[in-house]
Amino acid sequence: TQEFDPALAEKGEKIHEDSCKKCHAEGGSLASDDSGILAGQWMPYLEQAFKEFASGERPMVKKMKPKVEKLEPADIEALVNYYGSFK
């Protein structure tokens, strides 16, 4: 269990539904979708992963890149709170 901001988590859910759901099904909670589990991950880990994606330090699949590049810092914070809200 992590502390998260419910309002940000709600915003993050909308961003997930619009931009991430196709590959990260059910809130990013399915291992079977072969896209990595996001739901319930440690929030500092998620923040670091997004930073590494943005800097190019961490590779990402081609179809993910345009979606990540359009995210504003507030969107990333919302997504981190959404994924961190899962138990």
Image (cartoon, rainbow, N blue to C red):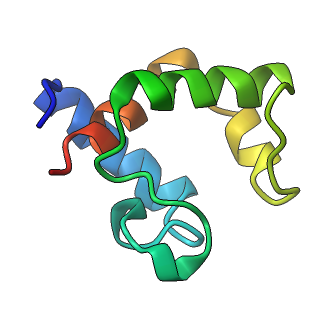
Question: How many circles with numbers are drawn on the protein?
Answer: 0
Residue at (57, 21) in percent of width and height: 48
Residue at (16, 24) in percent of width and height: 5
Residue at (47, 28) in percent of width and height: 45
Rendered position, 40 above or below 52: below
Which x, y percent locates residue 53?
A: 74, 31
Frontmost residue, 29 versus 23: 29
Residue at (24, 37) in percent of width and height: 9
Rendered position, 58 above or below 37: above
Does residue 38 appear to the left or right of 7 in the view shown? right
Does residue 34 appear to the left or right of 76 in the view shown? right
**Figure quadrant of residue 42:** top left
Does residue 82 appear to the left or right of 75 in the view shown? left
Q: Residue furthest bottom?
A: 32
Q: Quadrant of the N terminus?
A: top left
**Figure quadrant of residue 65:** top right
Which x, y percent locates residue 11?
A: 30, 37
Which x, y percent locates residue 58?
A: 79, 34
Rendered position, 26 above or below 38: below
Which x, y percent locates residue 13?
A: 32, 49
